[in-house]
Structure formats: C-alpha cells, structure tokens
Amino acid sequence: MENLKDIVSKFEIEGKVADVKPMGEGLINDTYKVFTEGCEKPKYVLQRINNAIFQDVDMLMDNINKVTEHLRKKGRYSLQFLKTNDGKSYYFDGEKYWRLMDFVPDSITYQAVTPEYSYIAGKSFGEFESLLDDLKEPLGEIIPDFHNIEFRLKQLRDAIAEDRVGRVKEVQYYLDEIFKREEIMTLGERLFREGKLPKRICHCDTKVNNMLFDKDGNVLCIIDLDTVMPSFVFSDYGDFLRTAANTGAEDDPNLDNIDFNMEIYNAFTKGYLEGTKGFLFPIEKENLPYAALLFPYMQTVRFLADYINGDTYYKIKYPEHNLVRTKAQWRLFERAEEKIIP
C-alpha cells in the first residue's frame, strides 16, 4: 500500500498516513480506508475514479463539488472532498485518477429493500432533488443520453440492421412488443421538446444503499454522486422501482419468480411525493406511473440490443445471459403494466 500512501499525501490531509486498507466491493470505483497516525478509526476515504465510464473527470468533480457545496449552504450534511496540495479536486498519477473525502464515522448503509426503507428512500431522494432546484450553476451531463429512451431505441434499431451474429429472428417476439409500445414509452422526450417537461438535477442511481444513515437510523446524506446530472425526475423515481419492486432477480431464468411489488411501489411513491412537496410540476406527478414502466422497458431494450450485437457491453456468465435478462426485464415490465395502468 506504499504507493497508495504516496497518493494520499498529495492531498491536504491532517496528520501522517499510517495505513490504507480496501473498503467495500464497489462495482465502479476502487475504494480504500485511510488511517492516520494516532487514530484507530479511518480518517479519510480514497477512491480511484473509473475514467473509462466517467471520461470527463473535470466535469465529474465539478458537478459533485457544486452539489455538495450547495447542500452545505442549506445546512445539510454532505460528503466533504479534499483538495490536492496544488488546489485541484482530484490527483492524476499519470495513469489513474484519485479523489479523497472525509470518512464519516459511525455511519451505516443498508442493503435491505423493505417498504420502510423504500419510503425513506423516496423521501430522501425527493428532498435531494428539491434542495438542488435553486442551484444556479449548471451541471454537465456526465453520461450523455444515459436515460434517453429514444437514443436507446436507436441503438436497438442499429443492432437489428446489422444483425452481426444472426440473432434477430429468434427475438422477433420481443422486438414486436417493444416497438408496439414505442409511441407511449417515448412520451417524456416528446414532452421535453414541447417545453412541457423540465430537466432537474437528479441523482440517476437511486438505491437504498446510496443513502448514508447515522447510528440512530436517521438519513445523513445521499452518497455515490458520480451520476448526478440534469435529467427528468422520472430517472430517480423509475430507476429505483425497476430494481426495488422486482420480486425476482434481474437475470432470473424462472419468470414465475418475477412480479412488480405494489407495496414497495406505494411506499416509495408516498415518500417521494412528501420529499418533493411543492416542487414537482403537475405534469411530472401525473406521469410517475409512466416512469415506473419506462425503466424496465428501457432496460429490456438495452439488454436486447446487447444480445443482438453479440454481447459486447454487459458482462455475461453464459451465452444466453443477455437473452435471459431481456426476458426477465420484460416480464417485470408486463407485471408493472398490468398493475399500474388502469
């Protein structure tokens, strides 16, 4: 860990680095606990920024700093990132990008997706959006077209046209079902072009474990801010439910396991409407059920496009993995459609 100690020393830290140890099992960034001399508990958290995904590191850290500073000005707790010795928000070692933040003592994250935590998540992410509504400084779109369904459908059409591994014929049923609903599922993008639907500052990765709790069970702050960017509120609302309300696994081969959990849906919605009280436009509230359908629909499109392309984007464990994911996600969409649409 000597090299990591050297990297930490490039930041404006208090004390001398004693040890650096791995922390958690992040899927995107490598994360480490940093201990300083004389302290038994970690003092800082060191992260390697995955610049293969977040290619504009300046934009990434600029977005995060604007958001965290704005929240602090409003008296809210938020993650505190340290500057490097030369005043930058990250350190580049010639190959990798690094950032350092304060370790939050006695803090907890939860993995369980229950109605209770879904309500808390809805309220917390709703408040997060509401608090950032008056942030005047613009944020960059760190992953362009991340939740743009028209863009994802174009990717699917491009995959069909090329049919590079000859899989289109076997998935024709799913293609027909997807395109049959294209008009209604692209509603958000049309409303935006018509000037009726705004883009807000959204988290864009809403999960129960992206909230930090104190030891008394109160929410301290929202974490994992890499994907914070302008988007429709549908992103934060719909993406949470896509995973949280699914009674099966995202790649469950047994479609009988998959249903759309209305208890989770109702709990999250209740919390979200409380957290965004006085903030959302009527058109946003009216179309929350659409958002709950949009995200399993969009993920079906993405899995299917990758399957048709020969599995070039998502990691697979066996040849039909993306097809199994497609079928599972579509079953979730169908169950949500049955229960949400009157």
Image (cartoon, rainbow, N blue to C red):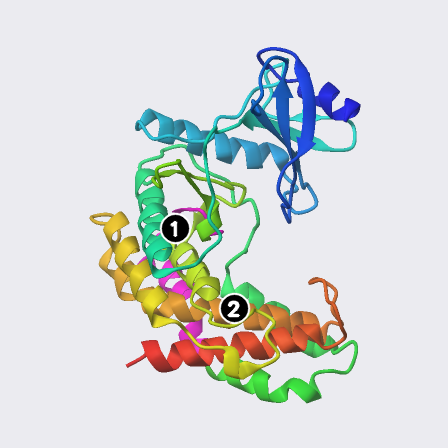
Q: Which residues are magenta?
A: 182-206
Disc 2 and disc 1: Cα gap in Å?
18 Å
Q: Which amino acid is tagged 1?
A: Lys
Which residue is tagged 1?
199
Residue 172 quadrant: bottom right
Would residue 188 be counted in the magenta stretch? yes
- In the rendered image, the quadrant that contains the N terminus is top right
Identified at 56% across, 64% down, the residue is 151
* Callout 2 amino acid: Met
Give the vertical position of 304 relative to 113 (above or below). Answer: below
Disc 2 target residue = 298
Residue depicted at 31% across the width and 49% down the height: 123
- Is label 2 in contact with label 1 (beta carbons under 8 Å)? no
Tell how many labels. 2
Residue 153 appears in view:
no
**Residue 27 % position (x, y):** 64, 49
- Secondary element at image label 1: loop
